Amino acid sequence: MKKVVKFGGSSLASARQFKKVADIIRADKSRRYVVPSAPGKRNSKDEKVTDLLYACYDAASQGGAYKKILEKIKNRYMEIIDGLDLNLNLDPEFDKIEENFLAGAGRDYAASRGEYLNGIVIAEYLGFPFVDAAEVIVFNDDGSFDAEETNRELSERLESLDRAVIPGFYGAKRDGSVKTFTRGGSDVTGAIVARAIHADMYENW
């Protein structure tokens, strides 16, 4: 039996929440394909990582002060990594993100990095292979989603993987530029993955 499980931002907002998610996944061996969102709010006064990424990108791409926002984002991930006792260094990823923000990579790219980084973290924590959604979720040049090409690419990639983490919310156009679904699009990614692997069940947590 094969299940796809998608977890929203509040489910992955902190190390404590990550541990709950891991327990859910490990409780059922058929939960083999995981679709994570970006970290959400830890409390009512907190900020979602996606909103921080938008703010950071807007400042960086317009020549404004962005460093403090970037540090805040880094600290969110460091708290999760430290709380999970992982030996994982995201500095190279953040260096690349900063470089791309300054180069004007686009708001879709910016927004997608929350899921991308969370995918790396949860894959490391679970010991699952990480599959970058930008390599398997295909958008046309006009920004429309190519369901059939995506199904081919994703089916082929996951055929040899008994389990995997595929970040939600984004994919890429054929030129490699990142494109996101509308907010809440991780739900859509989960359905796309479920179709590609002929899942027996898709659980949306």
Image (cartoon, rainbow, N blue to C red):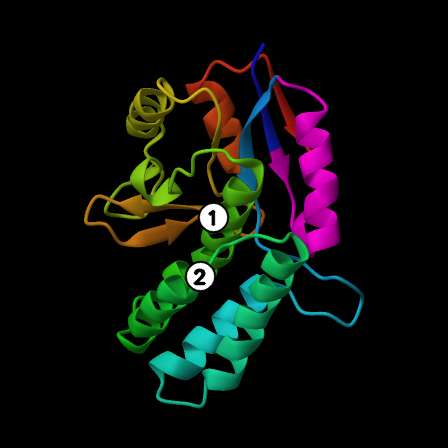
Amino acid type at circle 1 is: Ile
- Residue 14 sits inside the magenta stretch: yes
Q: Residue furthest top?
A: 1
On screen, 78 above or below 119?
below
- Left or right: 194 in relation to 5: left
- Left or right: 114 in relation to 85: left
Q: Position of residue 91 (x, y in %)?
A: 41, 67
Q: Counting other residues with Cα less than 10 Å from the Cα at mark 1, is it few (<14), some (14-19), or many (20 or more)? A: many
Q: Counting other residues with Cα less than 10 Å from the Cα at mark 2, is it few (<14), some (14-19), or many (20 or more)? A: some
Locate the N terminus by quadrant.
top right
Locate the C terminus by quadrant.
top right
User: For this rendering, which residue is in front, 66 or 88?
Assistant: 88
- Residue 23 sits inside the magenta stretch: yes
The residue under the point 57% across, 54% down is 38
Pointer 1: what residue?
Answer: 120
Q: Position of residue 131 (x, y in %)?
A: 39, 37
Q: Residue furthest right?
A: 44
The residue under the point 73% across, 49% down is 17
- Magenta segment boundaries in residue numbering: 6-29
Pointer 2: what residue?
Answer: 90
Q: Secondary structure at mark 2?
A: loop
Mark 2 or mark 1, which has the lower sequence index?
A: 2
Instruction: Determine contact: label 2, label 1, CB under 8 Å.
Output: yes
